[in-house]
Amino acid sequence: MLRAALIGFGQTGKTTLFQLMTSAREATRAAHGKGEATIGISKVPDPRLDRLTAMYNPRKRVPATIEFSDLATPVRAGSAQALVDVAAYKNADALVHVLRAFTDPAVPHPSGSVDPARDAQAMEDELILADLGVAERRLERLEKDLKKGKSAELERERDVVTLCRATLEDGRPLRSLDLQGDDLKRLRGFQFLSAKPLLIVLNLDEESLAGGDSIRAADAAGLKPFLSRAATAAVAVCAKIELEIAQLEPADAAAFLSDLGLKESGLDRVIRASYELLGYISFFTVGEDECRAWSIARGWPAQMAAGEIHSDIARGFIRAEVVGYEPLIARGSMAACREHGEVRLEGKEYLVLDGDIVNFRFAT
């Protein structure tokens, strides 16, 4: 499951976006203790799963999901340090920064004016500062351990963390580093906040939302230089009006979105942008019992994808029976695809493609 953690300064509409993404209408945050995240699950809309469900008429239809985390307390100067101790934020695959671009006299901006580019950089600085504290503490510990005894692994870890510290001191996020192999694994082990891919959700006025052109909205907000950085993307929404639309009947919601010139909902746009940023894809398992979508990172081999379903399937992996979504829909059945030679047997190193329908053969 993809995990995303929401961050933002005060009065940005972060809570509204969380409600939009997770259908969490109740104000549950008061029940949570200090530093405890609220978790919500969002079902990933996928018309391919709808068509497969119509084809197989299974007992269960199970979409892929995204877990969104949110803290009731907004980030303030110096407070991002607290995020490094929150499990939901440390374990997140990506950060979602809700950035205010709407004007509302009834909701004053904490900084006195609406300036998305300023706020984007201010949050970046907060994440960098928080990570710098983590890096410095780890280096102190490494130096103590190395005095007790030399270790090639600890020395390499010290080199990587030293590089991280220098990058942070230079004012650059760790997602800008191009680490590979074991060094990349070491970096992930620290769960640095600024190393995580960053999706900016630009929260617009309703008047500015027309057409939902995220690139144009980001350019108008002065974010083009910021978005040129590695592993950084943006999507535009109007959380307030789109939350209202999400509560309408489907036909009314579709008409409302059409009036705004939008082809898909804010929920769909944020999820799609998250998938694109992280390089995620979906494959499917189908049958009379269940049709299910599974989310994995692009480039995963079949055995790793099998492990997403169950570790026993990955452990006993024999072959993957694979057919593409388009051939299956065109032929109308798996049997017809077999007759036309469109069902393949693939080994554990096969790279699963977006839309693959997979049946894993495994030994128990």
Image: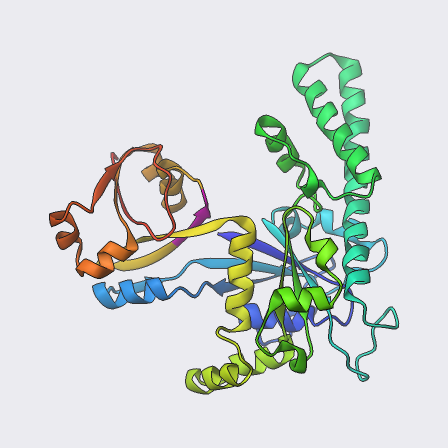
Against 353, residue 122 (above or below) is below
Horizontally, residue 12 falls left or right of residue 61, namely right
Q: Residue furthest right?
A: 112
Residue 280: % across, % down: 48, 50
Quarter of the image for residue 304 reads top left
* Residue at the image position 84 percent from the left and 38 percent from the top: 169
Q: Which residue lies at the image location 67% right of the left edge and 69% below the top edge?
A: 217
Tell me the residue at 20%/45% (across/down).
343
Q: Is residue 31 visible?
A: no
Give coordinates of residue 227: x percent, y percent.
Answer: 69, 54
Q: Is residue 245 magenta?
A: no
Hey, which quadrant is residue 223 in on the image? bottom right
**Quarter of the figure with residue 12:** bottom right
The one of 309 and 330 positioned closer to us in this rendering: 330
Q: Which residues are magenta?
A: 294-298
Residue beneath the point at 59% across and 27% down: 182
Q: Quadrant of the C terminus?
A: top left
Q: Is residue 276 visible?
A: yes
> Would you say 51 lies left or right of 169 here?
left
Name the chief secondary structure element in magenta. strand
- Residue 24 versus residue 281 in the image, above or below: below
